Image (tube, rainbow, N blue to C red):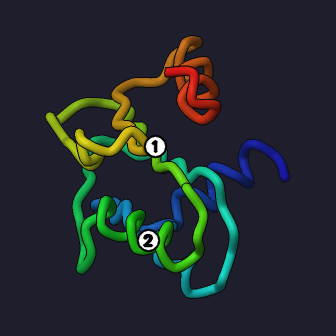
Amino acid sequence: MTLQQVLMAMSQIPAGGTDCSLPMIWAQNTNTAADVFIVFTDNETFAGHVHPAVALREYRKNMDIPAKLIVCGMTSNGFTIADPDDRGMLDMCGFDTGALDVIRSFTLDMI
């Protein structure tokens, strides 16, 4: 695919808020094993029918996997998705050269 084709395909995707619980719900419904869920989004995040923290806890329980969730907002609107009492959830804001190191370190339990 060329860059122009990617841009054209991306422009066809409806814009709006990001339901950060959908990856965990999908993985659970399809019995898909995942160690880490990473959601990259603009600043418009919200909880749909199930809050992402609840969806992750249900996924962990039903799949018996200590999965983690990282939500990376490209800009900040003061969003918070992660449960501050859960070391397996991380909210990030912005994406630069250090972001991948943070994601890697978090995934490997180094931070």
Return the residue found at the far top: 97
Reading the chain from its start, which is encountered first: label 2 or label 1?
2
Q: In the shown orientation, is residue 12 left or right of residue 46? A: right
Q: Residue at x 28, y 42 (%)?
A: 43
How many C-alpha atoms fall within 10 Å of the one at disc 1: few (<14), some, or many (≥20)?
many
Q: In the shown orientation, is residue 47 left or right of residue 87? A: left
How many C-alpha atoms fall within 10 Å of the one at disc 2: few (<14), some, or many (≥20)?
some
Which one is closest to the eye, mark 2 or mark 1? Answer: 1
Locate residue 39, reporting x and y percent.
48, 50
Q: Residue at x 46, y 49 (%)?
A: 69
Q: Is residue 33 above or below residue 95?
A: below
* Residue that numbered label 2 is attached to: 22
Work out whether residue 108 or residue 44 is closer to the camera in this orientation and state it. 108
Work out whether residue 14 or residue 103 is closer to the camera in this orientation and state it. 103
Return the residue found at the far right: 1
Q: Residue at x 52, y 58 (%)?
A: 11
Q: Disc 1 marks which amino acid?
A: Ile
Locate residue 71, reporting x and y percent.
41, 44
* Residue that numbered label 1 is attached to: 70
Q: Disc 2 marks which amino acid?
A: Leu
Locate residue 20, reporting x and y percent.
37, 60
